[in-house]
Amino acid sequence: MCGIVGYIGNKEASPILLDALRKLEYRGYDSAGIAVITEDKKLNVRKIKGRLSNLELLVQQNPVVGTCGIGHTRWATHGEPSDLNSHPHTDVSQTIAVVHNGIIENHAQLRTWLERHQVSFASQTDSEVIAHLIDFHYNGDLLLAVRETVKRLDGSYAIAVACSEHPDLLVVARKDSPLVIGRSEDATLLASDVPPLLSHTRQVQYLEDLEVATLTCDEVHIYTLDGDEVKREIQTIEWDMEAAEKCGFEHFMLKEICEQPKALRDTLRSRLKDGNVSFPTQVETLLKGASHLLITGCGTAYHAGMVASYVIEQVAGVPVEVTVASELRYRVHIRKEGEVCILISQSGETADTIAALRMLKERGIPTIAITNVVGCTISREADWVLYTQAGPEIAVASTKAFSTQLLSLFAIATLLAKQENTALLDALMNLPNMAQLLIDRQEDIQRFAASQFNKTKVFFMGRLVDFAISLESALKLKEISYTHSEAFAAGELKHGPIALVDTSTLVVAICTQPSLYAKMDSNIKEVKARGATALVITFETVHNFDECADVIFRIPQTHPLFSPILSVMVSQLYAYYCSVLKGNDPDKPRNLAKSVTVE
């Protein structure tokens, strides 16, 4: 959520900043703005509520000229979306501009203290206190002023600061919110994620927690809060701009759904050696020695853990506990002997998951991170990290990052399996091909969506792994089509959900567990008797539901425990086409953000 960009070089800053912000739209936002230092050392700010196109029009009508500037897309936390609450925020004299991601938890106390020092505020935001604090501490040394300011901040922040008295300098700092610095021959750039940097450079440095940095056109210096300089390795981003472009697809989400066969293949390749599942030696030793697995994450990542819990317990006999990270960090956690924690986060910057990680490490519990972003916070702080190979995921609603998380977890299950390892391994290796067969049939799902997208209620139900993947299926539909959708274990149908079933209801029954076909058949008939439309997702060889279902979508045959990777693709495509048919933008669903870096 929220996006930060910065540029200092020998080109006009405003078009570069606007283009960079465009590449961060997927993070979710409700207003946007830029601040540019002019040649005569004046700070010009342009900011406005609404989409980035509003800001582009504003800048077109009232241009700003200069080669150093910062920009921001805001996702409201404190104060409603408005022009005044938009970033950048400035001090009273409008010589210092700040953009901020995160939440300042002690902003009320700081605001009261500043008001006692005759500071007047222009916005309702927590972020504005940062600009006024920097001004309070400023005596000509901008780096020192920023260092002294962030020492007084409680909460999370990534900030970029521009000052009209320093037209060739930007100062940045971070705590619990990402910042990436791009290095090119003629400029230094800044962003809260990699995509805005790729059209300029692939050489980056990641700022770490409780660090500040000075950026000039040709130099970057990184410091601790005490002022000690830190040497930071320059890393090379391997993927290119094409991976972050639509490449002819109408939306990023559809492109990323269709990229899943390749993403699965690439992730699988990283987990195979000599025809067997392979992990780093220390990770294998840790997993094989675990007597209890704790899996945590938020949203879609949590659902991946739910699916994995059924699979690992069944094939390995290892007890698995799955807890939402925002609950785990606050509940009383009773450590089990031989416990290992797997933390899942697409971005690696999810605030609650990072907080849970730090809590577990304090208690001496070994941690393994599964993430898609090299150099992210969770990858640096976990004891070990397993990278998925999904490539950049731009759409807010996760698709290929989720399926590669599942594949990584299925690989762990295969590693730990006590029996039928060969059958699991064969199924694992065939999943990318099975996924491609599904993608080739997406028009079938599009036609079904065209007949059902106006349903006011959609229920997903299943048993065992089918129930777990129902949770993600329902989430995907509500995220981008804004349809009321729920998921429940099919055995719970009569314990409440059936009261809501009527002719306005679509029930999606996921049926891939052979021993439970008869139970699912009974559940489907119950909702049909009450007027619901029933879609069944099952294997291509299964005909148990031919008479009770209105529509059957058949997925390629695979091991029943691995079926969620395929069945969820049907749900992803259905959600996508419903969103488009309703006139929504599936890439940027309302009120949602790609990387949830605040609680």
Image: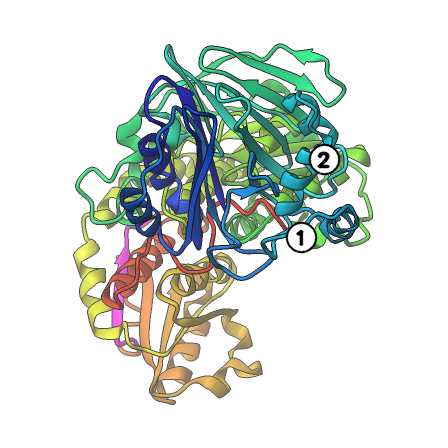
Q: How far across and how far down the image is residue 551, in percent?
A: 25, 71
Picture quadrant where residue 10 is located: top left
Would residue 306 be seen by someone viewing this image from the given angle?
Answer: yes
Q: How far across and how far down the image is residue 480, in percent?
A: 37, 60
Q: Residue at horizontal 62%, vertical 44%?
A: 351
Query: Is residue 212 found left or right of 110 in the rendered image?
Result: left
Q: In this view, does 80 lie above or below 421?
A: below
On residue 326, the disc is: 1
Which numbered disc, 2 or 1, marks the residue closer to the eye? 2
Q: Residue at horizontal 56%, vertical 48%?
A: 305
Q: How far across and how far down the image is residue 150, in percent?
A: 71, 33
Residue highlighted by disc 2 = 136
Badge 1 amino acid: Ser
Q: How far across and how far down the image is residue 79, in percent?
A: 58, 59
The magenta stretch is 549-557
Q: Counting other residues with Cα less than 10 Å from the Cα at mark 1, is it few (<14), some (14-19), or many (20 or more)?
A: some
Badge 2 amino acid: Phe
Viewer-nearest residue: 38 or 12:
38
Secondary element at tag 1 = helix
Q: Is residue 150 magenta?
A: no
Q: Residue at horizontal 42%, vertical 65%?
A: 478
Viewer-nearest residue: 421 or 115:
115
Disc 2 + disc 1, Cβ < 8 Å: no
Secondary element at tag 2 = helix
**Numbered circles on residues, count:** 2
